[in-house]
Structures are given as structure tokens and as C-alpha cells.
Amino acid sequence: MHPEFFHGSLKFYQSEDAFRLGTDAMVLADFARIPPGAAVCDLCAGTGAVGLLLLARDRSLSVTAVELQEASCATMRRSVAENGLGDRLTVLCADLRAHRTALPHGGFRHVVCNPPYDPVSAGAAPENPAAAIARTEVCCTLTDAVTAARWLLQTGGSLDLVHRPERLTDVLTALRAAGLEPKRLRLVRHRADKQPSLVLIRAVLGGRPGLAVEPDCVLYEADGAPSADYRRIYHLQERNESCPESST
């Protein structure tokens, strides 16, 4: 089980061979602005971190988490049960490439997605098949994820996505091609003097052109101390805690 968040009120189960909770899930959940009572679909959900984080912040939400790998779905179900969220988070083990038959058309106002980052052509995939599916586009390309999000969203609905900065052009191109207009963009840096490691984007289905570039999210101060952004994202503001391990 991963270190607890929200001062002990949220717990995650993870298996050793699955893709583990990282900074990308934490910053995506923080970036997503979801109104109370909304229905949210979490695509490429993995072991459910983003959906669980959203619900820990606002239990009036309802989340449908879509994940391809059954082992990850089983782990997610354990976390859902452990946190008493069975009535708020539905685990759907499905291939989003089959969205026309597996997922409801126009069923959501909000979608969040932490897709695989690396094209298959980028190099050798991890030897672990579960990690290869989570990290590379062997089973889900960026276009697959964006197309599924477009299918799920109502006009005016939003997609919140996290990806690598080096693929920003690919992301923006894929979003606009699907009719999802990028509206907010935020870069994530470990320190202010480092290159960005992640990019967060909100796009709106049928939205008008106009992209707001927000101040960078900086996780650590120059001396290595957690920044205000870090403490908010990891819910450490109200008490003095050590930093949980995280990775991108």
C-alpha cells in the first residue's frame, strides 16, 4: 500500500509489477477542476489513483474508471473497498479503443486521462508486460485516448490530460483534430531551474480558440524543500509531514 494522503483518510493499494503511483497522477488530480456532483470518466485509470484523489477531495462526484488490465482493475477495486467508495467509483475493465461499444456516447461532462507517454517506436519497451502497456502506446496511442474522450464528452465538456512536454505538439494537434480545443496549459518542474517534466492540459469539446498558459507548477525549492505547490498537491499543508516518495 502506498503512503496515505489526506491525513490518513485515503489509501492506495498497488502491486509490485504494476505501474506505480507517480507525480503525474498527483498533479493531474490537482489540476482538474471538477464542479460538485459531476460525473467523471477516468481513462487509462491504472490502479485508480486519479479517481480516488478526486473523490477524496469531493465525495459528491461519481467516477467511472476505465482500465484495460484486469490485474490493475482488481487492485483498484481493493482500494475502492478500503476507502468505502463503492457507491462513488465504478471500475470498468475495458479497452478504450472499443469505445463505441464499451463506453457511453456523450455520457460525461468531464474526462481525466493519464495515457501512456512513449510511442512504440521510441525504443525498447519494458520487459514487464504490465509496465509496457502502462508506459508505451502498444495498446493505447495518444489518438486512441483523445478519440475515446471525444466520444464520452458532451458538447462543452472538458478533458484534463497529463503528458510529456516533448510531445506537446502531438498532444495539441490530436486534441484539435478531435474537436477538443486546448484552453488551459501548465508545465510541471521539479525545481524552477530544471526543464519541465510534465505538461497539464485542459481541452473543451467545441470550445473557442484561446489558450491560457498558467504559471509553472514547481515542486521543490532551490534548497530541496517542498514547495507550496508540492504541499498542496500532496495535502501536506496542515501539518508537518515528510514527503512521500514519488516519480514521474
Image: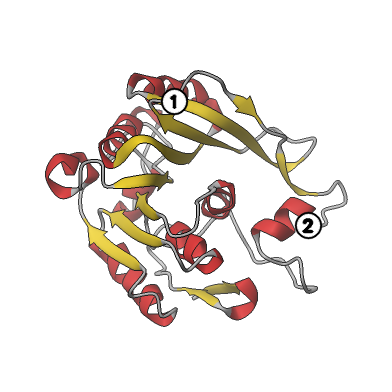
Q: Which color scheme does this rendered protein use? A: secondary structure
x and y percentages locating residue 85 in the rendered image: 39, 75
Q: Name which residue type carries label 1.
A: Gly
Q: Which residue is mark 1?
A: 207
Q: Dot 2, how many residues are within 10 Å of its Cα: few (below 14), some (14-19), or many (20+)?
A: many
x and y percentages locating residue 4 in the rendered image: 58, 75
Closer-to-camera residue (243/138): 243
- Numbered badge on residue 193: none
| Left or right for 189, reference 223 | left
Mark 2 / mark 1, whichever is N-terminal: 1
- Numbered badge on residue 226: 2
| Left or right for 1, reference 78 | right
Closer-to-camera residue (181/229): 181
Answer with the quarter of the image where residue 87 lies: bottom left
Secondary structure at badge 1 equals loop
Answer with the quarter of the image where residue 192 lies: top right
Give the Cα separation between the discs numbered 2 and 1. Answer: 36 Å
Q: Dot 1, how many residues are within 10 Å of its Cα: few (below 14), some (14-19), or many (20+)?
A: some
Whether residue 126 appears in this view of the structure is no
Closer-to-camera residue (26/185): 185
x and y percentages locating residue 148 in the rendered image: 27, 38
